Amino acid sequence: MRYPEFLSEGGTIGFVAPSFGCATEPYKTAFGMTIKRFEKEGYTVELGPNCYEDKGIGISNTPQECGKELTQMYESNVNDVLISCGGGELMCEILPYVDFDRIKAAKLSGILDILIIPTSHFYRIQLLIRQVYTDRVQAHLQ
């Protein structure tokens, strides 16, 4: 199993929307606040082309475009880590369109899903990051 390096200070966080993105409220505002928070902490952000798209039903774009985005962002030399900006329920639909041979050569080993929860009247952002779909990706990487 390959393990990615930890995100270093001043690193770049890549965001993708391989399933549901952040085109509608309250996700758009919460995601915007999250980006500002990461930038305030000194990180740079790279957004995939589907993060703010709303071209699908329950998914940010077509499965083909989402698979293309995920493949390209894995290959990017800009980001140090890759996080999904929205949900992951329909991500299974993109798997035929992900180029796992190209991802195999990439620097990351898993896909992270980020859940943004505004809490209390102060709208403090809590980031709950969990690794998802790793078993499926790992099966293709071996």
Image (tube, rainbow, N blue to C red):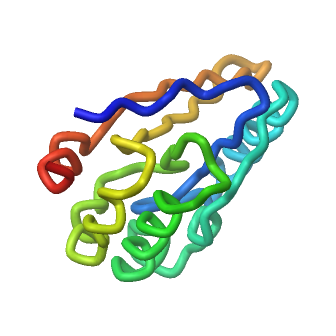
Q: Nearer the viewer, residue 5 or 89?
A: 5
**At which x and y percent is residue 87?**
42, 49
**At which x and y percent is residue 131?**
34, 33
Q: Nearer the viewer, residue 38 or 125?
A: 38
Q: Is residue 12 above or below residue 50?
A: above
Give the residue at x 60% y 42%.
80
The N terminus is located in which quarter? top left
In the picture, measured across the screen, residue 4 lies left or right of residue 82, that is: left
**At which x and y percent is residue 116?**
57, 34
Q: Is residue 117 above or below residue 69?
A: above
In the picture, measured across the screen, residue 42 lies left or right of residue 94, that is: right
Q: Is residue 66 above or below residue 142?
A: below
Q: Nearer the viewer, residue 44 or 102?
A: 102
Q: Is residue 62 above or below residue 32?
A: below
Picture quadrant where residue 24 is located: bottom right
Picture quadrant where residue 104 is located: bottom left
**At which x and y percent is residue 34?**
72, 37
Number of on-image labels: 0
Residue reaching furthest to the front: 105
Give the residue at x 30% y 39%.
132
Give the residue at x 30% y 35%.
2
